[in-house]
Each structure stands twice: as structure tokens, then as C-alpha cells.
Amino acid sequence: MKLARIVALLFAAIPAIFPLALHAQDYPSRSIRLIIPWPPGGITDVIARGLGATLSEALGQQVIPDNRPGAAGTLGVGIAAKSNADGYTLLMTDVPSHAISASLYKNLPYDPIKDIEPVALPSRSPLVLVVNPKLGIKSIPQLIQYAKTKSDFSFASSGPGSITHLTAERFTRETGIKPLHVPYKGGGPATAALVGGEAGMYFACIAAAIPHIKAGRLTLLGITSAQRSPLYPDTPTLAEHLPKFEMGCNTGFFAPGGTPKRIVDRLHAEAMKAVAQPRMKELLAANAAEPAPYTPAQFKQHVADEIREWGKVVRAAGLKVE
């Protein structure tokens, strides 16, 4: 009698002991909101929508994109950070912007490490160093020599504090050149300005630059990946000239801080399956991108490393936004 009572009590206690486990097994039971803190049409938006559509099929629930642009991505990230940590609000944003914001903004309304839980890095692609072909520059050493002799030489960026701006700031600091900074409102206008001869050089996301490189409107000098790109095997990496000069337009998949590990692990597993499917592989290839095989823990360390390294660049450039 006593044994039967003990067994009954143990079974009755299981839901109380393992509520998160049971919840995770039922997840998801309704649609999921995917916040994209950038306008429609950019590489982050394109990758996020592609992944969202693939995850919808895998999870059996709609993953609904929700563009929330503003304040260099911090508006949308802030919304995700303050959402319930139940797996029904997720985030896709580019890792460098998230990392840069940690040092650039004086009063962020969220903690960029504690309030955002890294899930997966489904897309990473490099930046490319491009110049206007009318300059006749064919290599990075030639660019450095040219810039040192021209007091009016300038570089374009997609805006103050952007990855294109801070990558150029790091390049100028490490090479000793002192070009003028000409910021534009987005990557499109910055690229157009370079093509039109309004600026001398630009660090562009590779997907946006490829059509102009192919058409001869821009000259490709270098790439910021760890290894040479199979698309441009004859183009050197920046790291061949400047040690550890590696960064890229990496799109990360996140959840609010405190999301149960079982849900994070489930989302990570499904995201990794998604990027291995033909549709996502084609989408990534079209944007010169590839997934990173990080576990959530490895991705979390990567984000922390990015915050630390970009913090050095922000401080060296003397940038701060109230």
C-alpha cells in the first residue's frame, strides 16, 4: 500500500520537476515571430526570410518575419531582448552590428550578452575592399602608397558606426593612411558613390559588390575572409597583408536571454538542418555566404569575441553615440 502511494506521488510530481522539458517537447505549439532589425531587401532580411520559411516547414508552425528597423539595428534587438524567453519571439541580425553597438552606444536599453541568447550562425560572408577603376590601382600595396600621397583621398561607408565604416577605420589605422571619411545612408548609396568617383575606396559586403566587379565598375583588391574565396581565388585576403584582419557580414540567429536550453538546442538543430537543404544552400551561395558549424556555446563565444574586438576599433576611432 505504501509502495503504491509512493509510486503515485512520484508520477504526480514529474510535471512539477520537469516543466521545461515537457514544454520543450511540445514546442512549438503556435506561430513564431522572427524579428529582423533591418529594412526589407538587405542580405540580413533575405537570409532571415529564407531560413524562416524553411523552419516553418520543419517545425510545423509559421515563422513570421517582422521587420523592425531603426537605430542601427538596436531598436529591433531591444524588442527581442525584452520579449518572453519562451521561444516564440526570435531574432535574426548581423553579428558585427550587434557587437559594434555594445561599445558605440552609451546607453543601450539591453545587455548585448546577457539579454540575447545565441542560437546559430547560418550565414557568414566576407567584406571586399574595392576601389574605383579609374584610379588604376590593382593591389593593396598600391592603394596604400597612393593614399599616402593624396591628401584628398577618401573612403565611403554605409553610415557612421557601421561595419563598413569601422572596417575602414581599422584598415587606415593599421596601414598608416589618413583618408577622409564620407558616410552615406546605406550600402547602396555608398557603392553608387564609389562607382561615380565620389570616394576612393570602400569595404562592401561581397554580395552587393559582385555585380559591379563583374561589370568592371569596381576593382577588387582584397577580401576579409580567413582564406581566399573560391569565387576570386586570385584575390588576396586582407590577412595576407595585415595579421588577423578578418571580419564579415555574418547573420546570426538569436533568442531572448534566458530561453530554455532545450528550446535553444532544438532551434539550433533545425537551423543547421535548414542550411543543409538545397533551397537554403542556393540562397546562401547566391549571396556568397556559407553557414558556420558553431554549437550555441561556440557561437556565444564568437559573439563575445566580436564584442571585444570591435570595442577596440570603436575606442581607437573615438566614436560614441548618446
Image (cartoon, rainbow, N blue to C red):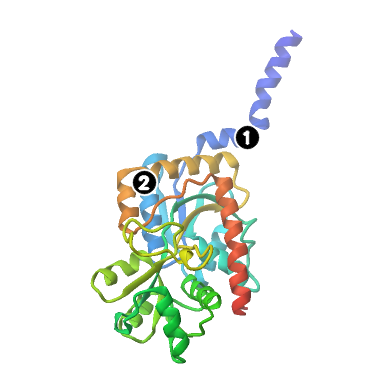
- Which dot, 2 or 1, sits closer to the camera? 2
Q: From where the camera sits, is residue 259 visible?
A: yes
Which quarter of the picture shows residue 233?
bottom left
Q: Which mark is residue 317?
A: none
Q: Which mark is residue 19?
A: 1
Circle 1: residue type: Pro
What's the residue at 39%, 40% (across, down)? 58
Q: Secondary structure at mark 1?
A: helix
Name the outermost residue toward the bottom.
151
Total number of numbered discs in the rendering: 2
| Location of residue 276 in the rendering, given as x and y in whole percent from the top left corner | 37, 43
Name the outermost residue toward the left.
215
Q: Which mark is residue 54?
A: 2
Camera-side residue: 160 or 111?
A: 160
Circle 2: residue type: Thr
| Image quarter of the N terminus | top right
Name the outermost residue toward the top.
1
Camera-side residue: 135 or 98?
A: 135
| Location of residue 289 in the rendering, given as x and y in whole percent from the top left corner | 38, 56
Which quarter of the picture shows residue 77?
bottom right
| Image quarter of the C terminus | bottom right
Distance, label 2 to label 1, CA atoms, is 28 Å
Q: Tell me if mark 1 has few (under 14), some (14-19) or many (20+) residues whose alpha carbon lies within 10 angstroms of its own.
A: few
Q: Tell me if mark 2 has few (under 14), some (14-19) or many (20+) residues whose alpha carbon lies within 10 angstroms of its own.
A: many
- The answer to whether the residues at label 2 and label 1 have Cβ atoms under 8 Å apart is no
| Location of residue 112 in the rendering, given as x and y in whole percent from the top left corner | 61, 61
Q: Secondary structure at mark 2?
A: helix
